Image (cartoon, grey):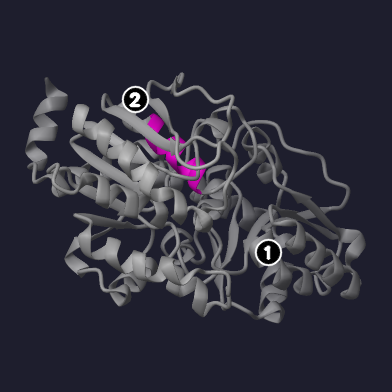
Amino acid sequence: MKIAVVSAHASPLPVLGDAEEGGQDVHVADLAAALAAAGHDVTVHTRRDSPRTPGVVRTRHGYDVVHVPAGPASPVHPDEMLPHLDEFTRCLRSQWRADRPDVVHAHYWTSGVASVLAANGLDVPVVQTFHSVGAVERQSGDDGVPEARLSTERLIGREASRVVAHCTDEKAQLVQLGVVRTRIAVVPPGVDVDRFKPEGPRLNRPLRHRLVSPAASAGDVITALRAVWDTELVVVGGRAEDVRRLREHAGASGVGDRVRLVGRVPQVAMPALLRSADVVVCAGADRAVTPLEAMACGVPVVAAAVGGSTDIVVDGVTGLLVPPGDPRVLARVLRPLLVDDARRDAYGIAAADRVEARFSTVRIAAETVRVYRQAAGLPEAVEASAHEG
Protein backbone atom coordinates (compact mmCIF):
# COMPACT_ATOMS: atom_id res chain seq x y z
CA MET A 1 0.00 0.00 0.00
CA LYS A 2 0.98 3.63 -0.50
CA ILE A 3 0.70 5.06 3.02
CA ALA A 4 0.84 8.74 3.95
CA VAL A 5 1.60 9.25 7.64
CA VAL A 6 0.89 12.73 9.02
CA SER A 7 2.67 13.74 12.23
CA ALA A 8 2.55 17.52 12.15
CA HIS A 9 4.55 18.31 15.27
CA ALA A 10 6.54 15.12 15.91
CA SER A 11 9.14 14.20 13.34
CA PRO A 12 10.64 10.69 13.43
CA LEU A 13 14.08 11.98 12.45
CA PRO A 14 15.33 12.92 15.97
CA VAL A 15 14.45 9.36 17.02
CA LEU A 16 16.52 7.95 14.18
CA GLY A 17 19.38 10.10 15.41
CA ASP A 18 19.04 8.75 18.96
CA ALA A 19 18.01 12.15 20.29
CA GLU A 20 15.66 12.68 23.21
CA GLU A 21 13.12 10.11 24.21
CA GLY A 22 9.56 10.88 23.31
CA GLY A 23 6.10 9.51 22.75
CA GLN A 24 4.48 10.19 19.41
CA ASP A 25 7.79 10.65 17.59
CA VAL A 26 9.03 7.24 18.73
CA HIS A 27 5.72 5.61 17.83
CA VAL A 28 5.68 7.16 14.35
CA ALA A 29 9.32 6.26 13.70
CA ASP A 30 8.94 2.63 14.75
CA LEU A 31 5.64 2.15 12.93
CA ALA A 32 6.90 3.75 9.70
CA ALA A 33 10.04 1.58 9.78
CA ALA A 34 8.01 -1.60 10.33
CA LEU A 35 5.57 -0.70 7.55
CA ALA A 36 8.41 -0.01 5.14
CA ALA A 37 10.12 -3.27 6.11
CA ALA A 38 6.88 -5.09 5.27
CA GLY A 39 7.08 -3.72 1.72
CA HIS A 40 4.75 -0.72 1.93
CA ASP A 41 5.49 2.67 0.35
CA VAL A 42 5.55 5.03 3.35
CA THR A 43 5.87 8.81 3.47
CA VAL A 44 5.79 10.74 6.75
CA HIS A 45 4.62 14.36 6.50
CA THR A 46 5.74 16.66 9.32
CA ARG A 47 5.97 20.43 9.72
CA ARG A 48 9.29 22.06 8.85
CA ASP A 49 10.61 23.48 12.14
CA SER A 50 14.14 24.48 11.13
CA PRO A 51 15.52 26.51 8.20
CA ARG A 52 18.30 23.92 7.84
CA THR A 53 15.93 21.00 7.33
CA PRO A 54 15.86 19.61 3.77
CA GLY A 55 12.50 19.28 2.03
CA VAL A 56 12.66 15.48 1.79
CA VAL A 57 14.79 13.02 3.74
CA ARG A 58 15.13 9.38 2.77
CA THR A 59 15.66 7.41 5.99
CA ARG A 60 17.85 4.37 6.35
CA HIS A 61 14.70 2.39 7.16
CA GLY A 62 13.31 2.87 3.67
CA TYR A 63 10.66 5.57 4.13
CA ASP A 64 10.63 9.27 3.27
CA VAL A 65 10.10 12.22 5.61
CA VAL A 66 8.60 15.26 3.87
CA HIS A 67 9.00 18.57 5.72
CA VAL A 68 5.93 20.69 5.01
CA PRO A 69 6.51 24.49 5.03
CA ALA A 70 3.78 25.86 7.30
CA GLY A 71 4.34 28.72 9.71
CA PRO A 72 7.75 29.65 11.11
CA ALA A 73 10.73 27.38 10.50
CA SER A 74 11.07 26.94 14.26
CA PRO A 75 9.47 24.73 16.93
CA VAL A 76 5.81 25.41 17.81
CA HIS A 77 3.89 23.83 20.69
CA PRO A 78 1.52 21.13 19.35
CA ASP A 79 -1.61 22.85 20.68
CA GLU A 80 -0.51 26.21 19.21
CA MET A 81 -0.30 25.00 15.63
CA LEU A 82 -3.88 25.88 14.68
CA PRO A 83 -2.96 29.18 12.93
CA HIS A 84 -0.58 27.27 10.65
CA LEU A 85 -2.85 24.36 9.77
CA ASP A 86 -4.43 26.03 6.73
CA GLU A 87 -1.05 26.26 5.05
CA PHE A 88 -0.16 22.75 6.20
CA THR A 89 -3.45 21.43 4.79
CA ARG A 90 -2.97 23.14 1.41
CA CYS A 91 0.48 21.58 1.03
CA LEU A 92 -0.81 18.11 1.89
CA ARG A 93 -3.71 18.43 -0.55
CA SER A 94 -1.40 19.57 -3.35
CA GLN A 95 0.94 16.62 -2.76
CA TRP A 96 -1.87 14.07 -2.56
CA ARG A 97 -3.52 15.37 -5.71
CA ALA A 98 -0.26 14.80 -7.58
CA ASP A 99 0.53 11.47 -5.90
CA ARG A 100 -2.56 9.97 -4.29
CA PRO A 101 -1.95 7.64 -1.33
CA ASP A 102 -4.10 4.59 -0.63
CA VAL A 103 -4.61 5.66 2.97
CA VAL A 104 -3.66 8.50 5.32
CA HIS A 105 -2.75 7.85 8.95
CA ALA A 106 -2.92 11.00 11.09
CA HIS A 107 -1.35 11.27 14.56
CA TYR A 108 -2.66 13.77 17.14
CA TRP A 109 -5.56 16.17 16.62
CA THR A 110 -3.62 18.78 14.63
CA SER A 111 -2.58 16.17 12.09
CA GLY A 112 -6.12 14.85 12.05
CA VAL A 113 -7.85 18.07 11.10
CA ALA A 114 -5.28 18.79 8.38
CA SER A 115 -5.59 15.25 7.00
CA VAL A 116 -9.39 15.19 6.98
CA LEU A 117 -9.56 18.54 5.17
CA ALA A 118 -6.75 17.73 2.72
CA ALA A 119 -8.24 14.34 1.81
CA ASN A 120 -11.75 15.71 1.32
CA GLY A 121 -12.92 14.96 -2.23
CA LEU A 122 -9.83 12.93 -3.12
CA ASP A 123 -11.38 9.57 -2.17
CA VAL A 124 -8.59 8.90 0.31
CA PRO A 125 -9.55 7.27 3.63
CA VAL A 126 -8.16 8.80 6.82
CA VAL A 127 -7.20 6.72 9.85
CA GLN A 128 -6.81 8.76 13.05
CA THR A 129 -4.74 8.09 16.17
CA PHE A 130 -5.29 10.77 18.83
CA HIS A 131 -2.57 9.64 21.31
CA SER A 132 -4.47 11.65 23.92
CA VAL A 133 -8.00 13.03 24.12
CA GLY A 134 -8.34 16.70 25.02
CA ALA A 135 -11.58 16.25 26.97
CA VAL A 136 -9.93 13.62 29.17
CA GLU A 137 -6.89 15.83 29.78
CA ARG A 138 -9.20 18.69 30.72
CA GLN A 139 -11.04 16.43 33.20
CA SER A 140 -7.67 15.44 34.67
CA GLY A 141 -6.97 19.05 35.54
CA ASP A 142 -5.02 20.27 32.51
CA ASP A 143 -6.32 23.82 32.05
CA GLY A 144 -4.05 24.36 29.06
CA VAL A 145 -6.21 22.36 26.64
CA PRO A 146 -7.55 24.86 24.07
CA GLU A 147 -11.28 24.94 23.32
CA ALA A 148 -10.53 24.57 19.62
CA ARG A 149 -8.98 21.19 20.31
CA LEU A 150 -12.12 19.87 22.01
CA SER A 151 -14.46 20.74 19.14
CA THR A 152 -11.95 19.70 16.48
CA GLU A 153 -11.42 16.25 18.00
CA ARG A 154 -15.16 15.62 17.81
CA LEU A 155 -15.11 16.67 14.15
CA ILE A 156 -12.20 14.37 13.36
CA GLY A 157 -13.90 11.50 15.17
CA ARG A 158 -16.97 11.90 12.96
CA GLU A 159 -15.09 12.32 9.67
CA ALA A 160 -12.24 9.79 9.93
CA SER A 161 -12.84 6.43 8.26
CA ARG A 162 -11.32 4.60 11.22
CA VAL A 163 -9.97 5.68 14.61
CA VAL A 164 -7.18 3.73 16.32
CA ALA A 165 -7.25 3.57 20.12
CA HIS A 166 -4.17 2.41 22.00
CA CYS A 167 -6.14 0.64 24.73
CA THR A 168 -9.66 -0.32 25.77
CA ASP A 169 -9.87 2.66 28.15
CA GLU A 170 -9.16 5.01 25.26
CA LYS A 171 -11.82 3.29 23.16
CA ALA A 172 -14.37 4.09 25.88
CA GLN A 173 -13.17 7.71 25.90
CA LEU A 174 -13.60 7.93 22.13
CA VAL A 175 -17.13 6.56 22.33
CA GLN A 176 -17.93 9.31 24.85
CA LEU A 177 -16.43 11.77 22.35
CA GLY A 178 -19.03 10.62 19.82
CA VAL A 179 -16.98 8.25 17.68
CA VAL A 180 -19.05 5.32 16.41
CA ARG A 181 -17.90 2.23 18.30
CA THR A 182 -17.70 0.04 15.17
CA ARG A 183 -15.20 2.45 13.59
CA ILE A 184 -12.76 2.19 16.50
CA ALA A 185 -9.97 -0.38 16.41
CA VAL A 186 -7.82 -1.06 19.46
CA VAL A 187 -4.21 -1.39 18.34
CA PRO A 188 -1.64 -0.94 21.12
CA PRO A 189 1.70 0.78 20.58
CA GLY A 190 4.55 -1.50 19.64
CA VAL A 191 8.13 -1.94 20.82
CA ASP A 192 11.27 -2.45 18.78
CA VAL A 193 12.31 -5.76 20.34
CA ASP A 194 15.72 -5.55 18.65
CA ARG A 195 16.41 -2.35 20.60
CA PHE A 196 14.59 -3.20 23.85
CA LYS A 197 15.57 -6.72 24.92
CA PRO A 198 16.76 -8.45 28.12
CA GLU A 199 20.30 -8.97 26.83
CA GLY A 200 22.65 -6.02 26.82
CA PRO A 201 24.46 -3.51 29.04
CA ARG A 202 22.91 -2.12 32.20
CA LEU A 203 23.84 0.92 34.24
CA ASN A 204 25.49 0.62 37.65
CA ARG A 205 23.50 1.56 40.73
CA PRO A 206 24.66 2.82 44.11
CA LEU A 207 22.09 1.06 46.30
CA ARG A 208 20.90 -2.53 46.51
CA HIS A 209 17.65 -1.87 44.63
CA ARG A 210 16.55 0.53 41.91
CA LEU A 211 13.12 1.67 40.74
CA VAL A 212 12.55 3.58 37.51
CA SER A 213 9.47 5.72 36.99
CA PRO A 214 8.23 8.21 34.39
CA ALA A 215 7.95 11.73 35.78
CA ALA A 216 4.22 11.95 35.07
CA SER A 217 3.37 9.61 37.95
CA ALA A 218 6.50 9.81 40.07
CA GLY A 219 4.87 11.80 42.88
CA ASP A 220 3.18 8.74 44.36
CA VAL A 221 6.34 6.67 43.92
CA ILE A 222 8.36 9.27 45.83
CA THR A 223 5.79 9.17 48.64
CA ALA A 224 5.93 5.36 48.70
CA LEU A 225 9.74 5.44 48.79
CA ARG A 226 9.60 6.64 52.40
CA ALA A 227 8.55 3.09 53.34
CA VAL A 228 10.81 1.26 50.86
CA TRP A 229 14.37 1.01 52.12
CA ASP A 230 17.80 0.58 50.52
CA THR A 231 16.26 1.60 47.19
CA GLU A 232 16.85 4.51 44.86
CA LEU A 233 14.31 5.93 42.41
CA VAL A 234 15.33 7.17 38.96
CA VAL A 235 12.74 9.51 37.44
CA VAL A 236 12.74 9.84 33.66
CA GLY A 237 11.36 12.69 31.58
CA GLY A 238 9.22 15.61 32.65
CA ARG A 239 9.18 19.31 31.92
CA ALA A 240 11.33 21.71 33.94
CA GLU A 241 8.44 22.62 36.22
CA ASP A 242 7.64 18.93 36.79
CA VAL A 243 11.24 18.17 37.73
CA ARG A 244 11.32 21.13 40.12
CA ARG A 245 8.06 20.04 41.77
CA LEU A 246 9.24 16.45 42.16
CA ARG A 247 12.59 17.54 43.61
CA GLU A 248 10.80 19.65 46.21
CA HIS A 249 8.46 16.75 47.00
CA ALA A 250 11.40 14.35 47.42
CA GLY A 251 13.13 16.79 49.78
CA ALA A 252 10.00 17.35 51.83
CA SER A 253 9.45 13.56 52.02
CA GLY A 254 12.94 12.97 53.37
CA VAL A 255 14.07 10.86 50.40
CA GLY A 256 15.84 13.50 48.34
CA ASP A 257 19.15 11.63 48.59
CA ARG A 258 17.54 8.54 47.03
CA VAL A 259 15.72 10.21 44.13
CA ARG A 260 17.53 10.96 40.87
CA LEU A 261 15.73 13.18 38.37
CA VAL A 262 17.51 12.55 35.08
CA GLY A 263 15.11 14.37 32.73
CA ARG A 264 14.85 13.26 29.14
CA VAL A 265 16.89 10.19 28.24
CA PRO A 266 18.10 9.44 24.68
CA GLN A 267 16.46 6.41 23.10
CA VAL A 268 19.85 4.76 22.74
CA ALA A 269 20.36 4.95 26.53
CA MET A 270 16.91 3.80 27.67
CA PRO A 271 17.42 0.01 27.45
CA ALA A 272 20.52 0.09 29.68
CA LEU A 273 18.69 2.22 32.24
CA LEU A 274 15.62 -0.02 32.24
CA ARG A 275 17.69 -3.19 32.56
CA SER A 276 19.38 -1.72 35.64
CA ALA A 277 16.03 -1.52 37.46
CA ASP A 278 14.55 -4.19 39.70
CA VAL A 279 11.08 -2.84 38.94
CA VAL A 280 9.66 -0.13 36.68
CA VAL A 281 6.78 1.67 38.38
CA CYS A 282 4.02 3.40 36.41
CA ALA A 283 1.76 4.73 39.15
CA GLY A 284 -0.64 6.69 36.92
CA ALA A 285 -2.05 6.88 33.41
CA ASP A 286 1.43 6.96 31.88
CA ARG A 287 2.27 6.44 28.24
CA ALA A 288 1.58 2.81 27.37
CA VAL A 289 5.02 2.50 25.80
CA THR A 290 6.76 2.88 29.17
CA PRO A 291 5.66 -0.47 30.64
CA LEU A 292 6.11 -2.10 27.24
CA GLU A 293 9.73 -1.00 26.95
CA ALA A 294 10.44 -2.20 30.49
CA MET A 295 8.78 -5.57 29.90
CA ALA A 296 10.67 -6.00 26.62
CA CYS A 297 13.89 -5.59 28.64
CA GLY A 298 12.79 -8.36 30.99
CA VAL A 299 11.93 -6.03 33.87
CA PRO A 300 8.69 -6.52 35.87
CA VAL A 301 6.27 -3.60 36.00
CA VAL A 302 4.15 -2.40 38.91
CA ALA A 303 1.45 -0.22 37.39
CA ALA A 304 -1.72 1.55 38.37
CA ALA A 305 -4.76 -0.27 37.05
CA VAL A 306 -5.70 2.53 34.64
CA GLY A 307 -5.21 3.30 30.96
CA GLY A 308 -3.10 1.09 28.76
CA SER A 309 -1.43 -0.71 31.67
CA THR A 310 -4.54 -2.83 32.24
CA ASP A 311 -4.19 -4.20 28.69
CA ILE A 312 -0.43 -4.69 28.92
CA VAL A 313 0.48 -5.88 32.42
CA VAL A 314 -0.85 -9.31 33.37
CA ASP A 315 -1.34 -9.08 37.13
CA GLY A 316 0.70 -11.72 38.96
CA VAL A 317 2.36 -12.91 35.73
CA THR A 318 4.38 -10.06 34.17
CA GLY A 319 4.12 -7.68 37.12
CA LEU A 320 1.48 -6.29 39.42
CA LEU A 321 -1.48 -3.92 39.10
CA VAL A 322 -2.29 -1.61 42.02
CA PRO A 323 -5.02 0.94 42.73
CA PRO A 324 -4.12 4.40 41.42
CA GLY A 325 -3.36 7.21 43.84
CA ASP A 326 -2.50 5.08 46.89
CA PRO A 327 1.21 5.28 47.81
CA ARG A 328 0.69 3.12 50.91
CA VAL A 329 -0.53 0.19 48.85
CA LEU A 330 2.28 0.82 46.39
CA ALA A 331 4.87 0.57 49.17
CA ARG A 332 3.27 -2.61 50.56
CA VAL A 333 3.50 -4.20 47.11
CA LEU A 334 7.06 -3.06 46.35
CA ARG A 335 8.74 -4.14 49.59
CA PRO A 336 8.25 -7.93 49.24
CA LEU A 337 8.78 -7.83 45.48
CA LEU A 338 12.16 -6.12 45.77
CA VAL A 339 13.54 -8.78 48.12
CA ASP A 340 12.16 -11.72 46.11
CA ASP A 341 14.68 -12.26 43.31
CA ALA A 342 13.04 -15.45 42.01
CA ARG A 343 9.63 -13.80 41.72
CA ARG A 344 11.05 -10.80 39.89
CA ASP A 345 12.96 -13.07 37.52
CA ALA A 346 9.80 -15.04 36.75
CA TYR A 347 7.85 -11.87 36.08
CA GLY A 348 10.65 -10.53 33.89
CA ILE A 349 10.86 -13.66 31.74
CA ALA A 350 7.09 -13.72 31.26
CA ALA A 351 7.09 -9.99 30.49
CA ALA A 352 9.70 -10.27 27.73
CA ASP A 353 7.88 -13.25 26.23
CA ARG A 354 4.58 -11.37 26.24
CA VAL A 355 6.02 -8.32 24.48
CA GLU A 356 7.75 -10.38 21.80
CA ALA A 357 4.58 -12.39 21.12
CA ARG A 358 2.03 -9.57 21.30
CA PHE A 359 3.58 -6.09 21.12
CA SER A 360 6.51 -6.19 18.68
CA THR A 361 6.46 -3.44 16.06
CA VAL A 362 6.22 -6.11 13.36
CA ARG A 363 2.96 -7.45 14.77
CA ILE A 364 1.56 -3.98 15.51
CA ALA A 365 2.36 -2.86 11.96
CA ALA A 366 0.46 -5.87 10.59
CA GLU A 367 -2.56 -5.04 12.78
CA THR A 368 -2.40 -1.42 11.64
CA VAL A 369 -2.37 -2.47 7.98
CA ARG A 370 -5.55 -4.45 8.61
CA VAL A 371 -7.15 -1.22 9.84
CA TYR A 372 -5.89 0.58 6.72
CA ARG A 373 -7.44 -2.07 4.49
CA GLN A 374 -10.74 -1.83 6.35
CA ALA A 375 -10.70 1.94 5.90
CA ALA A 376 -9.98 1.56 2.18
CA GLY A 377 -12.61 -1.13 1.72
CA LEU A 378 -10.05 -3.76 0.73
CA PRO A 379 -10.52 -7.40 1.77
CA GLU A 380 -7.89 -8.85 4.04
CA ALA A 381 -7.50 -11.86 1.74
CA VAL A 382 -6.02 -9.58 -0.94
CA GLU A 383 -3.24 -8.57 1.48
CA ALA A 384 -2.40 -12.19 2.17
CA SER A 385 -2.21 -13.07 -1.53
CA ALA A 386 -0.06 -10.00 -2.21
CA HIS A 387 2.50 -11.18 0.37
CA GLU A 388 2.46 -14.65 -1.11
CA GLY A 389 3.28 -13.18 -4.52
Q: Is 350 contained in the magenta span?
A: no
Judging depth in this view, the residue of 206 and 16 nearest the camera is 16
The residue pinned by badge 1 equals: 337
Q: Are the residues flagged by discs 1 and 2 in contact, CB closer than 8 Å?
A: no
Q: Quadrant of residue 239?
A: bottom right
Q: Main secondary structure of the magenta part?
A: helix
Q: Residue at x 69, y 37 (%)?
A: 272
Label 1: few (<14), some (14–19) or many (≥20) C-alpha neighbours in 10 Å: some
Sequence-first disc among 1 and 2: 2
Residue type, mark 2 in image: Ala
Which of the image's four quarters has the C terminus? top left
Question: Under tag 2, what secondary structure?
Answer: helix
Q: Position of residue 203 (x, y in %)?
A: 77, 38
Residue segment shown in magenta = 24-33
Q: Quadrant of residue 220?
A: bottom right
Q: Residue at x 50, y 30 (%)?
A: 194
Q: From the viewer's perspective, is 225 left or right of 191?
A: right
